[in-house]
Amino acid sequence: MAKKTLQKPKAFQDVFTRKSRDQKTTHYCPGCGHGIAHKLIAEAMSDLGLQDRSTIVAPVGCSIFLYYYFDCRSLSVPHGRGPAAMTGISRVRPDTISISYQGDGDLAAIGTSEIIHSANRGENIAVFFINNAIYGMTGGQMAPTTPLEMRTTTSPRGRASETEGFPIAVCELISTLRAPVYVERVSLDTPANILGARRAIRKALQAQADRKGFTLVEILSPCPTQWRVDPTKTGEWIRENMHPIFKPGVYRDVLAETPSRPRPERREMSDGEMYALLGIDENATIRALPTGCEDFHLAYRFAGFGGQGVILLGMLLAQAGMASGYQVTWLPSYGPEMRGGTANSSVVLSTRAIGSPMVAETDVLVAMNGPSLEKFLPTVAPGGCVLYDSDPIETPPAAPDGVHLYPVPARDIAQQAGEARAANVVMLGVYAAIGDLFEEEVLADALRKAFAAKKGAVEANRRALAAGADYARSHFPCPAPDRPGVMVK
Ligand SMILES: Cc1ncc(C[n+]2csc(CCOP(=O)(O)OP(=O)(O)O)c2C)c(N)n1
Ligand code: SF4
């Protein structure tokens, strides 16, 4: 008798490195449908030879860590934005097998508009929609697909149509649109139906490979933990509570009569075309570069608590950079809360076109609190510099080799200048004196613009800017010798 070896699909990683303790199992609860759906997708990718071409979305929800399991490209996106991100990828890289994997909170609540419009445009993406009728990750809140009368943490008396509306049937909704080529609902309630899900997933991925357009497979999937149902009883639960409102079946299948789409021709854009598209004046002249400096490219990170003005600090530098004729990008990053949470912004200033606003290696770090200094200090490149507020940070961590630390009692200086909240602007003044990249009036102008709505604040912040520059001149070599802008590249 032929021997059959059961093994992990090749499109799964050999070990799951999410936790050092256990690298063989996933983070899903026992009996969770995500694991089954992952296996069916991974198997299909391997068997159809699509693993190396696939990019899968790791959505916000219980499946957020799927990139630990799938051995293909993956992408984390904001809640519900899988179809939007995949639209971009499948248009720019038409050979990609673009997979948007989404829960019901992700797809049918916060992401409703993305799914409807990408389906309506007929984007060449495959959507795997895990409908478990509840928000799993966040503790069992009502989802748009929660059945009527079901109790959840946000419908404790049971979902009522008068107040919470009816469960949204996604396959029925999507199949009213003309563009989708294949829409099917499958169910993970019995082994036979799991085989049906396997067939549907393969069909959707093959349709992707054949460039047929938009496909969606809805997978009715168990969440024993939030349903408070024994994992061995979830099949019954699905049949009793979900099948009557979410009938499994094919809702649209026009694959056979749909021709494959031609691959769009790839054309690289010239620099000139790119500048024209972005409205950048290619011939803009740089006003004045520091003596001895012809070319520079500097990456900045401003970090602190929300409310310390690190986003504004980046914006002021970016504005001064633009006014000086440099190429500029500015990217804010907010923590979970506005005030009190962590925040940072990154800026790139360059005399050349900037490829990406992402900052991995930092040349200049401004840290307004201890956690930010600890987090970003290792990212500072050799030759880079760090300004930190020495009021809250009494003992800084050791600097990496070749990195210069400048302690600045910024809060104190700001207080003496008459505006305790302007510690961020004090730092700008210090940097401006050390870096020597800007004319004084350019910075003053950036301040005027930023505080246009608060007239009184302009003067106070100008004083803070000047106080920072004075402090730098009396405590540090200014400008930094032979290193205008603290230049390392
Ligand atoms: C913008 C935003 N809003 C809300 C949240 C909180 N949140 C995290 S997961 C989730 C719901 C996930 O439910 P679902 O998509 O059904 O996935 P499941 O966890 O059931 O797999 C919510 C609301 C968030 N992370 N981001
Ligand atoms: S909470 Fe539900 S969806 Fe999340 S891992 Fe557990 S069983 Fe799966």
Image (tube, rainbow, N blue to C red):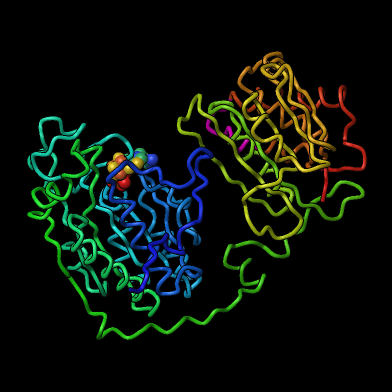
Question: In the figure, 454 relative to 350: above or below?
Answer: above
Query: Picture coordinates of residue 35 (x, y %)?
Result: 34, 52
Snapshot quadrant of residue 228: top left
The image quarter containing residue 429 is top right
Decide if residue 459 is in sight here. Answer: no
The reply, left or right, for residue 279 in relation to residue 63 is: right
Q: What residue is drawn where x is 86% and y is 22%? A: 475
**Depth check: 22 or 488 in front?**
22
Position of residue 111 in the picture relative to residue 401 (left or right) = left
Residue nearest the viewer, comparing 19 with 3: 3
Q: Is residue 457 above or below residue 380?
A: above
Label count reads 0
Instruction: Tell me where residue 187 appears, x and y as whole percent.
Output: 19, 58
**What residue is rendered at 42% in x and 63% in y?**
9
**Residue 454: within the magenta?**
yes
Q: Is residue 117 above or below residue 479?
A: below
Highlighted magenta segment, given as a residue range: 446-455
Q: Quadrant of ligand 2?
A: top left
Res. 30 visible in picture: yes
Any magenta on residue 49?
Answer: no
Dominant secondary structure (helix, strand or loop) of the stretch shown in magenta = helix
Quadrant of the rendering where the N terminus is positioned? bottom left
Q: Is residue 104 above or below residue 99?
A: above
Residue shown at 49% from the left, 56% from the top: 13
Q: Nearer the viewer, residue 164 or 205?
A: 205
Task: Give the image location of residue 72, x and y in percent.
Answer: 49, 62
Left or right, residue 401 beside residue 167: right
- Can you give x and y, in whole percent of width and height, for residue 243 in the image? 11, 55
Q: Residue furthest front?
A: 1
Tell me the residue at 58%/62% (across/down).
Answer: 278
